Image (cartoon, rainbow, N blue to C red):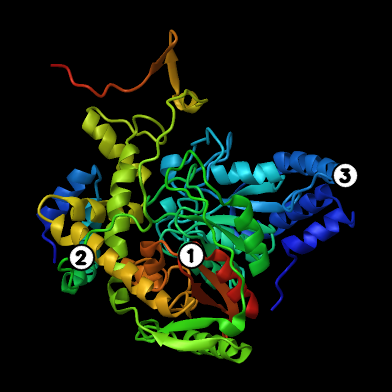
Amino acid sequence: MIDKNEVLKIMNLSRLKIEDSKIDKFQKDFSEILNYVSELKEADTENIPEMSHSIDVKNVEREDLACEYNGINLIPKEKQGYLVVKKILKDE
Amino acid sequence: MNKGITIKEIRENLDSKKYSALELTKDYLDKIKEWNPSIHAFLDVFEEDAIEEAKKADERIKKGDAHILTGIPCAIKDNILIKGKRCTAGSKMLENYIGTYDAFVISKLKEQGAIILGKTNMDEFAMGSSTENSYFGPTRNPFDLNRVPGGSSGGSAAAVAADICAFALGSDTGGSIRQPASFCLTVGLKPTYGTVSRNGLITYSSSLDQIGPFAKTVEDAKIVFDAIKGRDPCDSTSVDVVKNNGFDLKKIKLGIPKEYFGDGLDLEVKEAVEKAIEDYREAGAEIVEVSLPNSKYALACYYIIATAEASANLARLDGIRYGFEASGDKLEDIYLNTRTQGFGEEVKRRIMLGTYTLSSGYYDAYYKKALKVRSLIKKDFEKAFEEVDAILGPVSPILPFEIGEKTNDPLSMYLADIYTTPVNLAGLPAISVPIKLSKEGLPIGLHIIAPHYEENKLFNIAKIIY
């Protein structure tokens, strides 16, 4: 069974919180899943390369041209012609 | 088995003016009103737009300018962007998110003049095998309203099965087209990775996701696949290399992996699949046993890779840029509260699993190991395909299950994907074809897997039995 502190650590890394009342059940389910995926350890992968893509992929280059993008309309607030977003940098 | 009206039949009727695209569209909109409250396949229905598009389609037909999909009403999984339309991915996080552009596949459908009736329900961010993980409530299986339609593209599968659209698009990361197709007695295609652009698909796991069609027949699935495939400059992994060789069933060799018929396979499913294999033998195909020895690791490998990619992909949903935002005193609290309130339980579980396997100290043992096992799984298939043209097996080890039956046991839900996930890991094309109803009247599908870019071979083989 995965340690409760470990669960809290992953929660923090994931920027997520599990309600206190649900944490025991989460810990149990998570342990079962980890236990299952740990079966991979038995596979003999000596000298086997890692494969992150199933087909051959290579860099595709294109000219750096501007194109239409309407995503800016999704930002909800505007002030004097500027888009208003939450402050994400801290004061020194 | 009653297949319902097909794209091919509708095309003939539209072209011969038996009815207009407008009449047909209104008819489908009426059927949606009648059936959607009990099935809950659609999240949004675009009544006005559909009627406008139908009028335009009728003009095109009149002018003799119709494509094969002009005037054909369809449904789109709610993780595929349509400009100006809400796209929720089944999540509270994106409840009010409006698509800012058309996905590549949507542009293709619009060019052809297909009528988009609405967006269909799905497991949140495509994470699930039952459509119960939707923030907007589950979809019900048209064959038994107390059972799930499969998932994650359950809304699209149920909509086609209930004939409240002519065809639908879904996405398949670990079986999310094929398993619901099997559960709803429809045809579902997961194309070769890269043959259909992922531009405009809200990603779950970028190296596994693929868009594909749900249809009433294999022929219809091919029509839709041909309409949406192709290279797209906006998706660097997209390619234009689908093969089209001659086909002669008498020269076809089909492989049966012994590993796909072991423990955990429902007896009725097993018998139905064995009967379908026998049908192929009688039709003249050669049947041989093949081995995919590493398939026993596929599900574990999938759940490590998919969740690792998901944990990175979903990091952008933090309440700062777009989507749901919760309040908080400090910046960290805004992130935490937004993600905690915006994501459902299964999404949280998968983000945390992915975060865990990518974290320091576990990366080599889990993620790196899974990438190596992925190589082994692909090699198994390559070796099998040296000998056979395609592989046959079950799509799902179990029959459609009851709503609520597995929601408390996530691992048992994951096991529903045991036969479908290896295909995504290897990037192969595969199709689910209806074969039979169980004694209780529940759908069973056959899984056919082909080598990369051999969709046409897949269609030809599938057409023999459906």
**Residue at image mark 3:** B62
Quadrant of the rendered image containing residue A45: bottom left
Task: Name the disc covering residue B429, or none.
Answer: 1
Q: Circle 3: is it few (<14), some (14-19), or many (20+) Cα within 10 Å?
A: some
Alpha-carbon span between mark 1 and mark 3: 37 Å
Most foreground residue, B179 or B28:
B179
Q: Is residue B228 above or below residue B53?
A: below
In percent of width and height, residue B211 lies at 51, 54
Q: Residue at x 23, y 63 (%)?
A: B372
In percent of width and height, residue B87 lies at 52, 42
Tell me which chain the residue with mark 3 is part of.
B
Alpha-carbon span between mark 2 and mark 3: 60 Å
Question: Which of the two marks, 1 or 3, is nearer to us in this view?
Answer: 1
Q: Which amino acid, by three-letter code, is at mark 3? A: Lys
Quadrant of the rendered image containing residue B371: bottom left
Most foreground residue, A6 or B445:
B445
Question: Which of the two marks, 1 or 2, is nearer to us in this view?
Answer: 2
Alpha-carbon span between mark 1 and mark 2: 24 Å
**Residue at image mark 2:** A48
Q: Which amino acid, by three-letter code, is at mark 2? A: Ile
